[in-house]
Image (cartoon, rainbow, N blue to C red):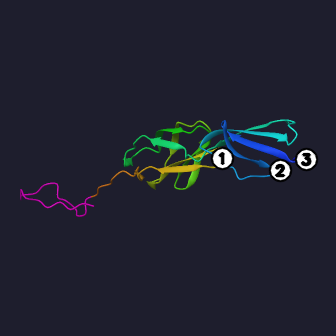
């Protein structure tokens, strides 16, 4: 606050209509904000009754993390992509990021779903949301295993096509 007056100036500061501080020749104060919009009004008058101009500020306090809700996914798949469905809510949402094994695979301000490519083996999928003031929340899915390798069988020992004993031992890999 900069005061331009040669006489004593009474300063009154209101937050959402409630007086939070007043005094003579105040030049700065510490102001406790509440969650949400804080409408700050600063009024001045001198000791002679002259009323100065008012200053009005709107300051929003946002300490709430974004909320992320994920849809469940299977533990195992045998296809190279998976469709993720989720919801992210925040009054000041800035960005949503999707990671697979700590690698960013998709991002955007309004993502609610994504097709994610998978790698053979364990995939660690997660979603991170950031709001405009820097509140960050991350949610991890349970580990997802991709297995596209088909089983392969082979006979270990040679087998006779014609046998006389009805009980035969088969060994295979």
**Please, is residue 165 above or below residue 86 in the view?**
below
Q: Which of marks 1 and 2 is in front?
A: 2
- The residue at which mark 3 appears reads as 7
Query: Residue 104 at what x, y percent from top left?
Result: 59, 50
Query: Residue 103 at what x, y percent from top left?
Result: 57, 53
Is 149 displayed left or right of 92 in the figure? left
Query: Residue 130 at what x, y percent from top left?
Result: 60, 46
Mark 3 neighbour class, 10 Å CA radius: few under 14, some 14 to 19, many 20 or more: few
Query: Residue 10 at what x, y percent from top left?
Result: 81, 44
Under tag 3, what secondary structure?
loop
| N-term-proximal mark, 1 vs 2 | 2
Q: Is 159 part of what is drawn in magenta?
A: yes
> Magenta segment range?
155-173
Is 140 displayed left or right of 162 in the figure? right
| N-term-proximal mark, 1 vs 3 | 3
Is 133 displayed left or right of 72 in the figure? right
Q: Which mark is residue 133?
A: 1
**Residue sitting at x 56%, y 39%:** 90
- The residue at which mark 2 appears reads as 25
**Which of these two is toward me, 66 or 84?**
66
Q: Distance between the residues labelled 1 and 3?
A: 40 Å
Looking at the image, which residue sits at the far bottom? Answer: 157
Mark 1 neighbour class, 10 Å CA radius: few under 14, some 14 to 19, many 20 or more: some
């Amino acid at each position: 606050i900069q005061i331009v007056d040669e006489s004593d100036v009474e300063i009154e500061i209101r937050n959402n209509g409630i007086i939070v501080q007043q005094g003579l020749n105040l030049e700065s104060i510490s102001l406790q904000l509440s969650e949400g919009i804080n409408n700050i009004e600063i009024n001045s008058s001198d000791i002679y009754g002259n009323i100065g101009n008012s200053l009005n500020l709107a300051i929003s306090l946002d300490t709430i993390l974004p909320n992320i809700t994920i849809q469940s996914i299977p533990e195992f798949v045998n296809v190279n992509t998976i469709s993720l469905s989720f919801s992210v809510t925040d009054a000041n949402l800035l960005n949503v990021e999707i990671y697979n094994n700590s690698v960013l695979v998709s991002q955007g301000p309004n993502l609610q779903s994504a097709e994610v490519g998978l790698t053979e083996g364990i995939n660690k999928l997660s979603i991170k949301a950031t709001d405009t003031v820097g509140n960050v929340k991350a949610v991890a899915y349970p580990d997802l295993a991709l297995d596209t390798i088909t089983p392969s069988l082979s006979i270990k020992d040679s087998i006779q096509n014609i046998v006389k004993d009805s009980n035969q031992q088969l060994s295979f890999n």
